[in-house]
Amino acid sequence: MPYQPFYLFIVSLIDDDSKLASFSLPLLLDEWMTSTRPILLFILFLNLTMSDATEIQLQITGVRGQEDVVAESDKSTSRADGTAAAAAAAAAPLPPVSSQRLRWWAVVLANIVFVLGGQSVATLLGRIYYDQGGGSLWLATVVQSCGAPLAVPLLLYFRRPEASPVARPPLLKIAAIYAGLGVLLAGDNLMYSYALLYLPLSTYSLVCATQLCFNAVFSYFLNKERFTALVLNSVVLLTFSAALVGVSHSSEETNSSVPEGKFALGFVLALSASAAFALILSLMQLTFDTVLRSNAAHAVLELQLWSNAAASCVSVAGLFISGEWSSLTAEMDGYKKGEVAYGMTLAWTAISWQLATMGMVGLVATVSSLFTNVISTVGMPLSPIMAVIFLGDRMDGAKVIAMLIGIWGFLSYVYQHYLDDAKSKNTAGSADVTQTSEAKL
């Protein structure tokens, strides 16, 4: 079991009889490096595949357009030339579209794994950090973006090709975009830190599912996404799900150390953070479509690195300006599980958030921001279940109903994607039949 050291570490944070304190720091670090090696190798495999994602997607979506151009060219020539061109096209081997689709889906599925696994583990560790004696909101904000250097080796490997057909945007323009995204990320991470402190993890996760509602609206105005009846149904259901959680909370629904009288503020902050996160994803898609004009691996890693680096700078500045940095030593000494567990909790939280961020940015680049939020919402039931298992949260009837309503809203959106995909396939099939008939004339 390659992730056994990490699993034992999670259990040790919950189990008071754990032997973690008897382990030496070098041994823990060695175990940690051993357990992260498969993750790093998987990241390398993902990005090796993503390096061809742009070419794959263009070939999948652009074959029909290329055929239309050829058909128009044939119409403008003589009948003999058109017949010869059609015969040559029929004799030429077709590109392996099926294998390209499989490679494209491999990239998408790998990003989905990163999003679901990363955000579930990161939110669980964030709640554990508070329960075991951590109290620095700015430090909890820093760890959400300080893992950006993990992308540096991959960015150095997947450099921007010198003969790229897309001109590089002006440095000042792209720097301003990355800085703006970083500031928004820092503010969003801070609101999430407050919300996670003030809310039980199960409630926090259900409220955060509303980000799909906000993203549907932002995608409609910024990314020209269609707003159909099923999407509207999904938005309404997820809104009702969060509202049901908001009006039926109980101060005794969790064993976590949630401050008294802060539920309303935590609910508002979680809702605001969800809206800000949806806006950030839509802005990222807008950046890929209109500024970078590329969704290759180097573009994804570049946006992840520099936006998170800017967010880290803002968060570190907030840590020092607020004065919380002076209490970190006392916080580490008073951590219930010890100094080693304190450092490992923060380290794994940073790694988990970066894996989730890599998956989200990759999905925004290869699919859309709305699809990314849908996948993030899929993980909604995971965090409450983990909170019940590890943290003792109580899943009362209202939360169960809210979770089922949220799942129904998610399935409504998935069904809309299914209909869109079926319609696009039918349109492509009709185009093939028309072109074949014209070639035979």
Image (cartoon, helix red, strand yellow):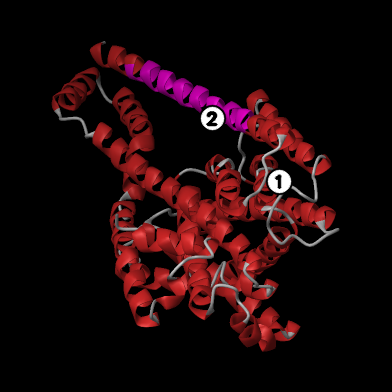
Q: Quadrant of residue 333?
A: bottom right
Q: Does residue 136 show up?
A: yes
Given this view, does label 1 or label 2 mark the residue nearer the observer?
Answer: 1
Instruction: Tell me where the magenta segment starts and ends, as one range.
Output: 407-432
Q: Is residue 254 above or below residue 104?
A: below
Quadrant hosting residue 215? top right
Q: Amino acid at mark 2?
A: Val
Please name the residue that numbered disc 1 is placed on.
Answer: 207
Q: Nearer the viewer, residue 367 or 150?
A: 150
Q: Is residue 100 above or below residue 317?
A: above
Q: Secondary structure at mark 2?
A: helix
- Which residue is at 33% across, 19% downward? 432
Other-residue count near label 2 (Cα within 10 Å), few / some / many at <14 / 14–19 / ≥20? some
The image position of residue 213, as x and y in percent, is 69, 40
Checking the image for residue 414, the label placed there is: 2
Please report whichever mark, 1 or 2, sits nearer to the chain's N-terminal start. 1
